[in-house]
Image: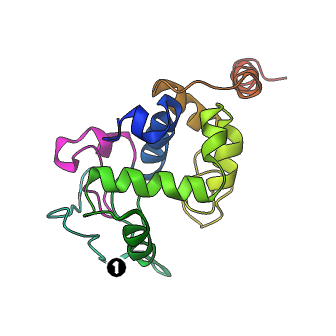
Amino acid sequence: MPVITPAQAGGVNVCAFLDTLAFAEIGKPMLSDPRTDNGYRVIVGSLPSKLILMDDYGDHPNRLVRIRKGLSSTAAGRYQQLYRYWGHYRALLALPDFGPLSQDRCAIQQVREQKALHLIQEGRIADAIHRCRNIWASLPGAGYGQHEYSLERLLYEYQRAKGVLCDADKTWYERALLERRHPA
């Protein structure tokens, strides 16, 4: 769970969406490893077997990590936020540090800027994911050349995090599960 409360975040669905983003960006094994502080200390390039962690939450670590030839990143934290945008969000939101609550608030602001916050609150998660795909490389259709999760898997994780789907997304998800079990 994120550190931010549902009341601060804008509802239970927003917290569930943050959990879904964290799952997509850093994965379940790193989220469950106590050394990562629920993912808040993870630096890009980490693997469950080889963690790269922030020493403290004073500021974004601004550590450029080469992922592979032609791909480097400064992403850090539970939502793998990039350093080049951190200063803007820190000032805009008057964030005191890069701690868990600051990371949550920054991610929510990024969602808000994509005009997806109300979609999440309404349970329209497929639409919200589509609107946020340009920020998070792990979302379907992001197109950054990194692993992208399927919409089906993300809707599953969202529901596991106690998020409520709107009727249309719930119907789509149930149909996708049925088709997977019984292909035409």
Q: Is residue 179 above or below residue 136?
A: above
Secondary structure that dominates the magenta span: loop
Q: Which residue is the extreme one toward the bottom?
A: 70
Residue at 53% of width from left, 32% of height from top? 13
Quick one: 63 or 12, which is closer to the camera?
A: 12
Q: Is residue 24 visible?
A: yes
Q: Would residue 184 be found to the left or right of residue 27 on screen?
A: right
Give the number of marks: 1
Q: Would residue 85 be found to the left or right of residue 56 on screen?
A: right
Which amino acid does the dot numbered 1 rest on? Leu
Residue 159 appears at what percent x and percent y?
53, 25
Q: Quadrant of residue 173?
A: top right
Q: Quadrant of residue 178?
A: top right
Residue at 46% of width from left, 43% of height from top? 18
Residue matched to label 1: 64
Residue 22 appears at what percent x and percent y?
42, 46
Residue range in magenta is: 27-46
Q: Is residue 139 above or below residue 118?
A: below
Q: Quadrant of residue 67?
A: bottom left
Residue 55 appears at what percent x and percent y?
14, 64
